[in-house]
Amino acid sequence: MNYISLIEKYLNKKIINYQHISIWWDFEVYIVDRVIFRLPKTEEKRKWMIEEMEKLSIIKKYVSLAIPNCQIINDSFIVYPLISGIQLPDEKSIYTDKVINQLVWFMQELHSIPLSEFWHKNESTNDWTDNSWLRAFVDTLKEDLHKKIGTILSKNQMNDLENYMQELFFNYESPKKAFVHTDLQNKNIIYDETRQEITWIIDFTDSKIGWIELDFCHFFEAGDDVLRKFIEIYTGNRDKSFFERVFFLARRSIIFEIHNDEIFNTKYDYIVQKLKKYKFL
């Protein structure tokens, strides 16, 4: 597809200078005159894009942190102004009390949105559904993991990993569901260096009704102490098992990173270290 011609038609002018970003297999992104154009690569992603816009129209009524003020054009692509700030750095020191409190407040607002707001959007209240498609997907994951890390893990370690996948995809249940972002990681959190605070939360593509622990998983990367501080403030230190549930779900990231050839083929040492960090190795 000629994405540039679509943008030129929308802007009604010839484009000479632009920045192009290809985000894995989901979307092509072009930045033209400080305007972002996000274009889905497949029909499935186009439908996701439309659903995301519907969800954003609801979310913005309930959260105080800024979220993208997007406009969808002919159900074909998304347009929104380039936002100021940087993606939240990976440095542990960036997680000040101010930043943690901002993010906890955002999660509390998001998780408090009445689920009835989304039910008419056909949002499922089940995170994983035991069906033939899911079993085939998990079997594919297991086969891929055996091929890629079969020489890294012992037979017992591989059995532990497969048992974990069985529990994750078919047996795990969280005490509470809410509307969750699901991908609340540093790249989707925009930080103002001057004010030293969070200014935007972006990328609600995978947001849905699901387990609230999903929104804490990425903070495990900053360390146990940072994650525990998030949980303590969020729960008022009442839920003693919250950390264990978050860690259980956070471990799934390594499975998908191994399965992703783009990551596995370029970050082998990183994969090994993460297998150790998540106690698979």
Image (cartoon, rainbow, N blue to C red):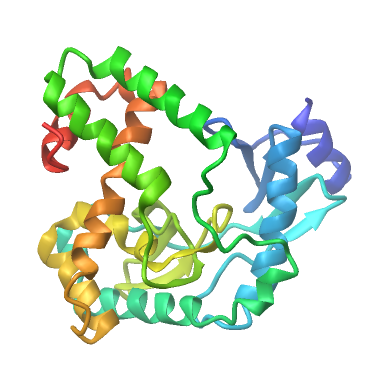
Q: Residue at x 41, y 75 (%)?
A: 107
Number of numbered discs overlaid on the protein picture: 0
Residue 121 vs 60, above or below: the answer is above
Tell me if 24 is positioned left or right of 172 in this view: right
Tell me if 229 is positioned left or right of 55 in this view: left
Please indicate, yes or no, whether residue 247 appears anywhere in the rendered image.
yes
Residue 98 position within the rendered picture, expressed as x and y whole percent measured from the top left = 26, 80
Q: Nearer the viewer, residue 143 or 135?
A: 135
Q: Residue at x 23, y 18 (%)?
A: 149
Q: Residue at x 66, y 58 (%)?
A: 52
**Quick one: quadrant of the C terminus?**
top left
Q: Nearer the viewer, residue 113 or 210?
A: 210
Please indicate, yes or no, whether residue 33 appears anywhere in the rendered image.
no
Tell me if 78 is positioned left or right of 199 in this view: right
Residue 56 position within the rendered picture, expressed as x and y whole percent measured from the top left = 65, 67
Q: Residue at x 15, y 63 (%)?
A: 93
Residue 119 position within the rendered picture, expressed as x and y whole percent measured from the top left = 69, 70
Q: Nearer the viewer, residue 129 or 267?
A: 129
**Quick one: quadrant of the N terminus?**
top right
Residue 267 vs 12, above or below: the answer is above
Q: Nearer the viewer, residue 59 or 151?
A: 151
Residue 105 vs 164, above or below: the answer is below
Tell me if 39 is positioned left or right of 226 in this view: right
